[in-house]
Amino acid sequence: MSENELSEVVLAALRAEQDRAVLLDHLLSPVPPEQVMERATELGVDLGGRRSVLIVGTVSTVVLERLRDSALLVGIRSGTIVAIIGGRVPRGAETAGLGSPGLGVTGIRASFGEAERALEVAGRLGLRGVVPFVEVLPEAVIGQDHETLRALADLTLEPLRSHRRNGPQYIETATTWFQEGLSVAATARTMGVHERTVRYRLARIAKLASLDLQHADDRFRLELALRGARLLDEASD
């Protein structure tokens, strides 16, 4: 291949890369879906099926190359790498948000919004790897109103935090109890304490916070406050 022919090949590859970058930008913007689909067809990019959006918070050539091997479209937007995935989701150690599969342009745009929120929650909680939106949906919902969430967390948890020196034990016990599916035995094993200790702490939690932990609404309030406090604390670090 001559030098001129090589230059033409390189220029053609650069133009194709630029065209795909523009397509990704139009796909994730208010450009009419029919125009996006028409341009995608011209470029040989199949957006007709169910596609997911993956947003990686770390921009690097290594991540870009990894995603180019498996994604339909890949580009850099607002300091992140955005990839449109049509099949198996590529995994990596970098923190990434993954939206639910969506059909066509409208579905991809919805998936993009989910991926953004998943990445935001993952960043607050210090999560690593690919974080699907469905797995952090509760945190994504409760994290939208920080002022109300802070008021709920303070009102519910302050009696547990400030009571003598047992605050951390009460918070840790309640959190573990929810994580272990309300099982006293599992909570005791996880924390390395006796079951009687867990029951005592739960009774004290209920009394201090003025909650009836046998009642679903009160349990929901406590768990919501615990999750909210974790989100707010991580966000302020």
Image (tube, rainbow, N blue to C red):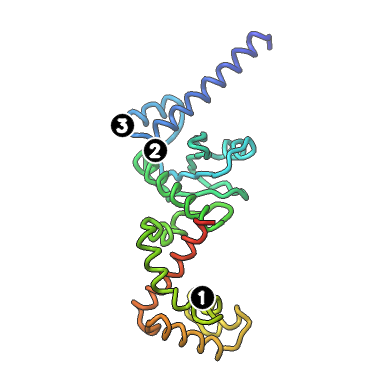
Q: Nearer the viewer, mark 2 or mark 3?
A: 3
The amino acid pointed to by label 1 is Ile
Give the labeled residue for mark 1: 171
Q: State whether residue 96 is above or below residue 164.
A: above
Is disc 1 surrounded by few (<14), some (14 to 19) or many (20+) residues within 10 Å?
some
The reply, left or right, for residue 63 in relation to residue 163 is right
Precedes in sequence: disc 2 or disc 3: 3
SS state under label 2? loop
Q: Which of marks 3 and 1 is in front?
A: 1
Q: Which of marks 2 and 1 is in front?
A: 1
Give the position of the C terminus as an image quadrant.
Answer: bottom right
Give the labeled residue for mark 3: 32
Image location of residue 52, percent across then percent down: 45, 45
The residue lying toward the viewer, choosing from 145 and 180, is 145
Dot 2 and dot 1 residues touching (CB under 8 Å): no
Q: Residue at x 35, y 62 (%)?
A: 148
Q: Quadrant of residue 211?
A: bottom left
Give the labeled residue for mark 2: 48
The amino acid pointed to by label 2 is Gly
Q: Residue at x 58, y 42 (%)?
A: 58
The amino acid pointed to by label 3 is Pro
Q: Residue at x 34, y 77 (%)?
A: 217
Give the position of the N terminus as an image quadrant.
Answer: top right
The reply, left or right, for residue 232 in relation to residue 169 is left
Q: Residue at x 41, y 62 (%)?
A: 138
Is disc 2 surrounded by few (<14), some (14 to 19) or many (20+) residues within 10 Å?
some
Mark 3 and mark 1: span between their CA atoms? 50 Å
Mark 2 and mark 1: span between their CA atoms? 48 Å
